[in-house]
Amino acid sequence: MNSENHDTMLLEKLLERYRLTRPVPPEVQDSILSSKKENLVRILKTAGAFTAAYGAFLSFYFAVKKMGAGIPLMKFIISGISVAAVAYGGYHLMTAGPGANHTNPPAVKALSLEEIRAQYKWVDEITLYNGKVVRGAIVSRGEAYRVLTTEGIVMIPRSQVKMVKPLKLSDEEREAAPRDSLNERLY
């Protein structure tokens, strides 16, 4: 007798011994099916792997399965979400790109450096690591510098900024500028 037949015979004897070859009664089948979610949640909690995200996903999955859709619909939904995420990411990368300068919609009128200096009382010269120099007023700082330039508002990622220095006022502008301690320190 070969090994495969012997293993099969042993398995059949084991199944017969514990009466696992008999069909499960319908009421027991219903009980097993209705307690699937609770048993899975209990096992995940015992293993320490249960989170709110798992809970939400399992609730959604078992609700869909109860309606009769099951795994094929879940695969379809997950595939659709994945395609949408990849498409959005590709669109965002193509339009904004990592480290790209983002120009706001033309809501800001283009100003000259003199007009920017008159409005904000300063103009900065921002030197980037790639050698490019941007002149304008830094409106806000954070992960990106928001700079009002002669072309409009430009976002410059902080990681690309090498140096920021204020541009000096001309003698006429210095005389016309109001005197305060900040101006005295800068010029």
Image: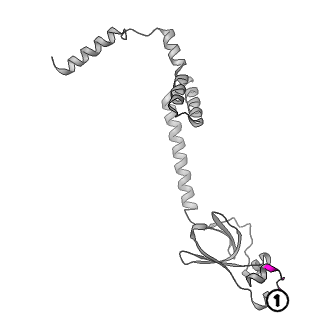
Q: Is residue 176 magenta?
A: yes
- Point out the stretch of residues depicted in magenta: 175-181
Figure check: 125 above or below 49: below
Q: Position of residue 174 (x, y in %)?
A: 79, 87
Q: Position of residue 67 (x, y in %)?
A: 57, 24
Question: Mark 1: which amino acid?
Answer: Glu
Quarter of the image for the N terminus: give it.
top left
Q: Nearer the viewer, residue 71 or 163?
A: 163
Quarter of the view holding residue 152: bottom right
> Which residue is painted at 29% across and 16% down in the image?
11
Residue at point 49%, 13% (across, down) = 29
Quadrant in which residue 165 is drawn:
bottom right
Q: Nearer the viewer, residue 19 or 114?
A: 19
Is 58 situated above or below 146? Answer: above
Relative to 125, residue 175 above or below: below
Tell me the residue that label 1 is attached to.
Answer: 175
Can you give x and y, in whole percent of width and height, for residue 110 in the image? 72, 74
Label 1 crowd bin: few (<14), some (14–19), many (20+), radius 10 Å = few
Does 105 lie within the magenta span?
A: no
